[in-house]
Amino acid sequence: MEEFVIATLRYGTPLVYVTMAGVLAQRAGVWNLGLEGLMIIGCCAAVLGLVQTGSLLFGLVLAVALCVLASALLWFVVERLRANPIIAGLGLTGLGLGGTDLAVQAIYGSQATVNAPYGLPRLGPYFGDFGVLSVLVAAMPFVVFGLWALLRRTRFGLQLSASGEHPFAARSVGVSPARMRLIALCLGGVLCALGGAELALGSLTIFAYGMTAGRGFMAFSAVIFGAGHPIGSAAAALFFAIVGAIGIRAQLAFGDRVPNDLLLALPYLATVLGIWISARFRGGAKAASSFGELRDY
Amino acid sequence: MTKAMLAEAPTAFALQCRDISVQYGEVAALVGVSLAFAPKLIHAVVGQNGAGKTTFARVAAGIVKPVSGTLAIGGREIPTGNVGQARAAGVELVHQSFALPPSFTVAESMEFGAERGRPVFSRRGLEKRWQKHLENLGVRAGLRDRIRDLPVEAQQGVEIARALVADAKVLILDEPTAVLSPSGIEKLFERLKGLKASGVTVILILHKIREVLGVADTVSVLRGGRLVEGPIAVGATNARRLSASIIGVQAEKEIAADEAALVGATAGDALAGAAPAAAINAAPVLAMQRVVTRADSEGPGLEEVSLRIGRGEIVGVAGVEGNGQRTLVRVLANLVEARSGQILLEGKDVTKTPLSERRARGLRIIPFERNSEGLSLSSALWENWSARQLLLGPALRLINPSWYRNACDASLKEWDVRYHTTMQAAGSLSGGNAQKLILAREIDADASLIIAAQPTRGLDVGATAFVWRALRDARARGCAVLIISSDLDELFDICDRIVVMLSGRIVAEFRPPYRLGEVGAAMTGAH
C-alpha cells in the first residue's frame, strides 16, 4: 500500500505543480497549452544547471529563470502581438521540446540522456518509507492550498480571477487584465520549473529528450476536469497519477501477459475520460468554447 | 441658455470636461464635448444610440482615453484614461450590461474593487465587512449568492453597491433602466434620489425622455458625438423640444414616428389593422398548447405555455429578461425539446419537426443576438442573405453564386441596406444595417410566422422606425408576428395583443389600450 502511495506521489507531484500553473493561467484568462514546453524546459535547465556547475541551487534558479522568461514570451506574443493563445501555447511546447534537445546536443554532441550526480533533497528517514520522496512532494499540499487562498481569499486573487472571467469588470475597477495575465503566467512559470525539476531530479537524476511525455497536456486536462479550481484540479491530477501508479503495478503483476504499452497508456486514457466527464456533466465543453480567444472588451 | 446655467452653478463642478474628443479607428465617437455638472444634483445625458453617450460615460470614468480634452473632478484636474485616478477622485460608473464576474459571490464583488481593508481575508470577515454596506443601500441579496444566480434588478443593486464601496462623489449610470421592470425603475429612481440627498452627484445616461423628465434636475443632449445643448434645467424644457434636439432636423413625418419611439406614446396605431378575434381563433398560424420544457443554463423552462397567434396579428411578449422569453424562441426554433405539449404551425403538429422543415412551412426568426445567432460576421453579405434558401435545398446541390449575389443586391437595395458590395463581410455593417440584412433574409413572401426577438435593441431611432414598418407591412400581408422585447413602449406601440411572461409561464394577457401600471405589475408578479 505504501509503495502504491509513493508511486502515486512520484507520478503526481510534478503533475500537480504544472496543473497549478495551468490553473493560474486559466483564471487569468489564458488557456496555456505551453505547459508541456515549460515543464521540459524546467527539467532540462535543472539538470544541465546542476551538471554544469555542480550546484543544485544554480540548476533550480536557472530552471525558474528560463521558465519565467518563456512564460513572459508567451504573454508577449499573446497579449501584445495578439496571437491566438492556443497556437502560441503549442508553439511554446514545440520550442521547449526542440530547444531542450538542441541544448543537450550542443553541449554533449549527442542525444543521450544526461545523468545528474544527485537529485533534490529527500525527506529523510524521519518519514519512514516516505523518506525516499523529495521535499517538493511534501511542499505540494501547501502550494495547492496556498494557491487556493491566494485566488479566493485575497483581493489580488479576486482581481486576477476577474481578469480572466470578465476583463471589462476588472478594467472598470482600475485593474489591468494584461498585467494580471503577465503575473499569472510568470508565477505559473515558477511552478512549471519546480514541476520539471521534481520530474527530473525528484526520484530520478536524469534528463532525457521528451521525458515529460505529455504530462503538460495531462495537467492542462486536469485544469479542465477540475473546472479551474486549485483543489479540484489538483485532485484531478492526482487521479491521473493514481491511474498511472495502477498501470505500473499492473505491469509488475501481469508481466508479459498484458501488453506493457496498454498499461502505460492508462493515465492518458483516464485523461480523455476526465475531459469527457467534465464536458458531459459540468459544461466543460462550454468552457472549451472560449478556447483561443482572449476576451478584452 | 447654456451660459446662463453655467454661471448660476457653484464654482467647483462635480465633474467637468473640456473639449473631449474620442476616436474609434475612423469613427469619431465624441467631437469637442465640453460639459460641466453641478454637484449634488441628478443630471441626465440623452441622445440616440450612437450619439456617444456611453463613450462619454466611459471617458468620465477613465476607461476610454480621449484623443484630446481635459477632465476635472471637484475642480481638480485628473489625467484622462486612467480608471485608478478617476476612482480615487470619486467617479464610479455602473455599466449598462453589468460588469461583475458571474462566478463571484456578492461579498467578493464588493471586495475586488475595494481600496482599503486587509489584503487577506476569511469568508466570514469578508461578509462582515460588506453586510452593513449593502443594508445601508437597501440592496437585498445574500452575501453568499453568486452574481449569476441573481435576478437582474438585484444584480444592478449589487453593481451600484459595488460602485459605492469607495467614497464616490460622482456616480454615473449607463442606461440603468434598460433591464428593469417599471416598478424596478421606480425603485432605482428612489434610490438615486436618496443618494442625491446624501451628497452624491448622479449622472444618468438615458434615452427615454419620459424617464428623464421624471427624475433628472438637468438634461444635456448629445447627437452624433457632439453636444447639442445642456446642461439645461429640466423645468426649462419639455418632451417635444427635447425630442426635436435629440433627433435633429428631419422630415416632419419621420419625426412623428421617431418621436413615438423616444417619448413612448401609448396606444399608437396598434388598433388599426388588427385582425378580428374570430379569425384568429378559427385558424391560428401558431398554436402552442401547454408546452413544457426543461430549465437549462440559458434560462428557466417553459411551464404549460399556451399561445395562439392568428393571421395578420402582432403579439408581443413582455417580461423582465430571463423569465423564459429565450426558451420560448428556442422551443419554436426546435433548439430545445418540448417535454410535453404541442406546437401547431398552420394547423400541423410540428412538435417533433426539425427546424429546417418548420422553416419550409414559413417560420422565420429574427434572433436575439444578431451578431452571433443572426449573422456570420466573417461571411459575405450575399452568403448571409442566401443562407435561408441554401439550407433548405439538398446538401450537394450546385449553387450559382453570381445569381445569389445579384438577387442579394436587389433585395438589399429594396431593404435600404447601406453597403459597399455584396462581397463585404457582414461584420462590417453597422447595427442598423446588419438588422436590415436579417430582415431582408427572414421577411419574404413565403413567411407565415415571424418571430422577432429584441428586433430594435441597440438600433437608432431611424432604424427602429424602419423595423417597425417592416413588421407592420408583414402583418398587412397576413403574417403572424411574435415580438419579444424588454421595451414596453415598443410593445405598446406595435402589438395587437401583449402576453406577459414570468418564471416560464404566461401570466397575463392584455389588449389595447395598454396601461403601463397593469403590465408592469404583471411582469413582477404583483398583480
Image (tube, rainbow, N blue to C red):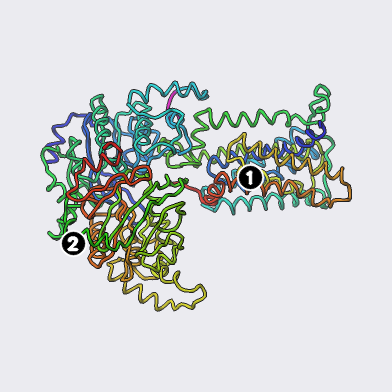
Q: How many labels were placed on the picture? A: 2
Chain ID of residue with mark 2: B
Identify residue type, mark 2: Gly
Q: Check disc 2: other Cα within 10 Å, few if <14, some if 14-19, many if 20+.
A: few
Q: Nearer the viewer, mark 2 or mark 1?
A: 2
Is disc 2 placed on a helix, strand or loop?
A: loop
Chain of the residue displaying label 1: A
Q: Which residue does the image show at 74% across and 37% down from the upper left?
A: A198
A297 or A47, nearer to the observer:
A297
Camera-side residue of A144 and A87: A144
Query: Badge 1: few (under 14), some or many (20 or more) residues near its Cα, within 10 Å?
Result: many
The amino acid at mark 1 is: Ala
The secondary structure making up most of the magenta span is loop
Q: Which residue is mark 2?
A: B273
Magenta-tinted stretch: B111-116
Q: Residue A189 at x, y = what percent?
A: 64, 40
Q: Is residue B386 above or below residue B400?
A: above
Q: Quadrant of residue A188?
A: top right
Q: Does A216 sit left or right of B57 as displayed?
A: right
Q: Is residue B268 visible?
A: yes
